[in-house]
Amino acid sequence: MIVVMNSNCTDKEVEGVLERLRELNFRSHLSRGTERTVIGVLGEVYPELQDELEVLSGVAEVVRVSKPYKLVGREFKKEDTLVRVGGLPIGGGQTMVMAGPCSVESEEQIMSTAFAVKGGGATVLRGGAFKPRTSPHAFRGLGIDGLKMLDQAKAATGLPVITEIMDVRDLDIVAQYADILQVGARNMQNFSLLDEVGKPGKPVLLKRGMSNTIQEWLLAAEYILAQGNNQVILCERGVRTFEPATRFTFDVNAIPLVKRLSHLPVVGDPSHGTGKWYLVEPVALASVAAGADGLLIEVHPSPDHALSDGAQSLTFENFNKLMGRLSLIAEAVGRPLLTADNQRSPVGA
């Protein structure tokens, strides 16, 4: 259920509605848009509640939300949410790129990659310090040492950092170094983790689970927003199907569909979605043409020697080629490429 306030409502009237909801033991979420102020009512509502709220001062209407997710849906917030990472806007009609290695392997590797992806036009450095692996015997990251190396690369290049959080127990240390907290596909429905990553107030990138529906993905995002954090980026990274020719089946049509259903920005991960470096570029271009707000690309100085996901990683040369072509597609669809040198906020944001 959402409460839509009159366009000329006062702060006192808004607070009156919030106070009434507290008295009724409901949680609420306030959203002030350019056109309207909306209050989301969280909890098991009853039919008479609509009548009780409609008579409150400043209320224009009370609407029952038809979908199970409330805060992430367009019914609650019509305007696109703009996620900010420092001075960097994600969403708002521009295209941005997060790039770097699957795993941080050494100081030399992450530093060289950071400078390479910044030179190519990336605006965020990605790199895994804690890695979920199918086999317990595979390389699982450098942990805290990896976080410190990411921090050194950030200091040297000025690029904000995105890295994965796998365990609630690591949240404080990861949040200390990361500018964006990444929740991976395997943790999309780790509800305890989702609750906790919403609390620090930092941007969160939520990947779609490999076997999850779009509704389940959006409900996972709802957990984060319910903690008061609307700085959430959704990431399509492919789903598991019967097709063995690619690592996963990248769901391009999920991008425009989710942007229709939700106000949150959506990015694509063609590296994990395909598992093959030569498929990354065409799927990346398709993602942007479909309306993606950005991309997550794996880049490595020597993919053949990578400790994880080398087969899907681009060399520095191939990353530069991709960025050149990506710029053309982004301009053609009216979503210009945002680089480290041309960061600007969208008009009216």
Image: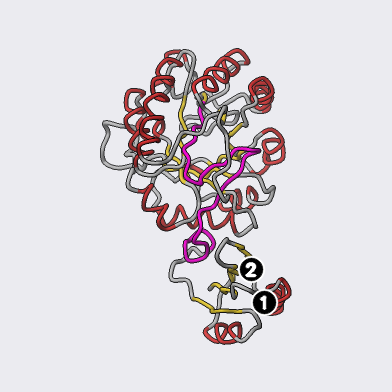
Tell me which segment is drawn in magenta.
71-99
Q: Is residue 142 above or below residue 57?
A: above
* Mark 1 residue type: Val
Residue under the point 68% across and 27% down: 144
Of 206 and 54, the residue lying toward us:
54
Residue under the point 71% across and 77% down: 16
Q: Which class describes the residues within 10 Å of circle 1: few (<14), some (14-19), or many (20+)? A: many
Residue under the point 37% across and 33% down: 284
Rendering quarter of residue 321? top left
* Mark 2 residue type: Ser
Task: Give SS at disc 1.
Answer: helix
- The x, y position of residue 114, in whole percent, is 57, 20
Task: Give the Cα distance between marks 2 and 1.
Answer: 10 Å
Residue annotated with mark 2: 28
- The x, y position of residue 217, in whole percent, is 45, 52
Tell me which numbered mark, 2 or 1, is placed earlier along the sequence: 1
Q: Do the residues labelled 2 and 1 touch (CB within 8 Å)?
A: yes
Residue annotated with mark 1: 17
Rendering quarter of residue 334? top left
For residue 79: magenta? yes
Q: Which class describes the residues within 10 Å of circle 2: few (<14), some (14-19), or many (20+)? A: many
Of 333 and 103, the residue lying toward us:
333
Q: In this view, does 325 lie above or below 286?
A: above
Task: Give SS at disc 2.
Answer: strand
- Name the magenta segment's main secondary structure: loop
- The x, y position of residue 139, in whole percent, is 53, 23
